[in-house]
C-alpha cells in the first residue's frame, strides 16, 4: 500500500506530455464541479485559494511538449482555471464575492509563505539537511522578485476578469455566457502573463532578458495555452446551471 503512488507515477510517466496536460486539466474541471455542486460558493472560494498554492509549486517545473519548442511552466493549467472559477462566482454569486475571493487568496498565500519559512528555519537533528528539508526549501523558499511579480499580476488580472465578466453580464443578462466567459478570461489572462513576465524577467530581474525572449518565450507560448484552456472550459459555465446547489 505504501508504494501505491510511486507505482501510479511510474504508470503516468508512460503517457505523453500532452495527455498528462489534458488529464490534469480535466482533474481541475472535475474538482471545480464537485466543489460547486456540494459546497456552492464556499467550494469555489476554497478551490481558488488552494489552486494558487498548487500552481505556485507546479510552476517550478517546466514541461516540454512535442509541438512547442519553448518549455511551458506546468502551473499554467491550474492557474488558468482560477479565471473560470472567478467567472462562476461572478455569474452565480456576484462580483462582490468574487473580489473578496481575490483578497482572501492573496492573504492565504502570504500565510502559506510565512508559516513555511518558520518550518524551514526549524533545526533538524544532526548536522545535515534531510531530503525532506531540501524539498521543502525548494518548494517554499520564495524568490522575492517572482513573489511580488506574481501577486501584483494576480490581483490586477483577477479584477480585470471580474470587471469584464460583470459588465458583459449586465449588458446581456444570462445570454451570451460563452462570450463573457472567454472574453474576460482571455483579456485578463493576457494582462496576467504580460505583467508577471515584464516584472519578473525585465523590471525586477538582476539581468533583464531580451524583450523578444519574454514576448515570445514566456508571454506568447503561455497565452496560446490559455486560449485552449479557456475554450475547453466554456461548457463548464453552462453545466454549472444544472449543478447549482440552491440550498446553500
Image (tube, rainbow, N blue to C red):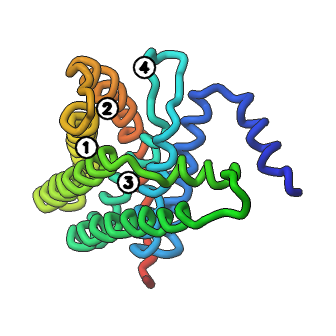
| Disc 3, SS | helix
| Comparing labels 2 and 4, the label whose residue is closer to the camera | 4
Which residue is identified by label 3? 82
Q: Is residue 137 above or below residue 75?
A: below
Q: Earlier in the sequence, mark 3 or mark 4?
A: 4
Give how far apart the Cα atoms at labels 3 and 2 are.
15 Å
Horizontal and vertical percent position of residue 129: 66, 51
At 41% from the left and 46% from the top, the residue drawn is 233
Give how far apart the Cα atoms at labels 3 and 4 are.
24 Å
Q: Is residue 149 left or right of residue 27?
A: left
The circle drawn on residue 131 is: none
At 57% from the left and 50% from the top, the residue drawn is 27
Q: Earlier in the sequence, mark 4 or mark 1?
A: 4
Which residue is identified by label 1? 192
Which residue is identified by label 4? 70
| Disc 1, SS | helix
Q: Earlier in the sequence, mark 3 or mark 2?
A: 3
Give how far apart the Cα atoms at labels 4 and 1 are.
19 Å
Query: 10 Å neighbourhood of mark 2: few (<14), some, or many (≥20)?
Result: many
Give how far apart the Cα atoms at labels 2 and 4 are.
13 Å
Dividing the picture into quadrants, the one containing residue 210 is: top left
Q: Are marks 4 and 1 in contact (CB under 8 Å)?
A: no
Amino acid at each position: 500500500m505504501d508504494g501505491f503512488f510511486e507505482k501510479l507515477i511510474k504508470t503516468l510517466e508512460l503517457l505523453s506530455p500532452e495527455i498528462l496536460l489534458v488529464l490534469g486539466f480535466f482533474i481541475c474541471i472535475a474538482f471545480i464541479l464537485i466543489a460547486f455542486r456540494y459546497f456552492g460558493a464556499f467550494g469555489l472560494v476554497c478551490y481558488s485559494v488552494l489552486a494558487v498554492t498548487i500552481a505556485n509549486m507546479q510552476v517550478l517545473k517546466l514541461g516540454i511538449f512535442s509541438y512547442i519548442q519553448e518549455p511551458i511552466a506546468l502551473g499554467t493549467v491550474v492557474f488558468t482555471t482560477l479565471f473560470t472559477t472567478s467567472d462562476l462566482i461572478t455569474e452565480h454569486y456576484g462580483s462582490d464575492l468574487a473580489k473578496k475571493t481575490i483578497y482572501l487568496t492573496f492573504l492565504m498565500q502570504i500565510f502559506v509563505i510565512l508559516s513555511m519559512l518558520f518550518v524551514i528555519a526549524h533545526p533538524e537533528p544532526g548536522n545535515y539537511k534531510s531530503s525532506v528539508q531540501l524539498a521543502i526549501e525548494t518548494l517554499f523558499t520564495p524568490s522575492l522578485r517572482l513573489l511580488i511579480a506574481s501577486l501584483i499580476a494576480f490581483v490586477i488580472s483577477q479584477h480585470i476578469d471580474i470587471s469584464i465578466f460583470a459588465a458583459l453580464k449586465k449588458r446581456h443578462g444570462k445570454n451570451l455566457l460563452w462570450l463573457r466567459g472567454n472574453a474576460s478570461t482571455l483579456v485578463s489572462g493576457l494582462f496576467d502573463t504580460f505583467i508577471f513576465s515584464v516584472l519578473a524577467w525585465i523590471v525586477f530581474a538582476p539581468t533583464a532578458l531580451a524583450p523578444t525572449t519574454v514576448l515570445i518565450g514566456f508571454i506568447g507560448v503561455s497565452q496560446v495555452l490559455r486560449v485552449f484552456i479557456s475554450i475547453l472550459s466554456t461548457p463548464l459555465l453552462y453545466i454549472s446551471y444544472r449543478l447549482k446547489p440552491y440550498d446553500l
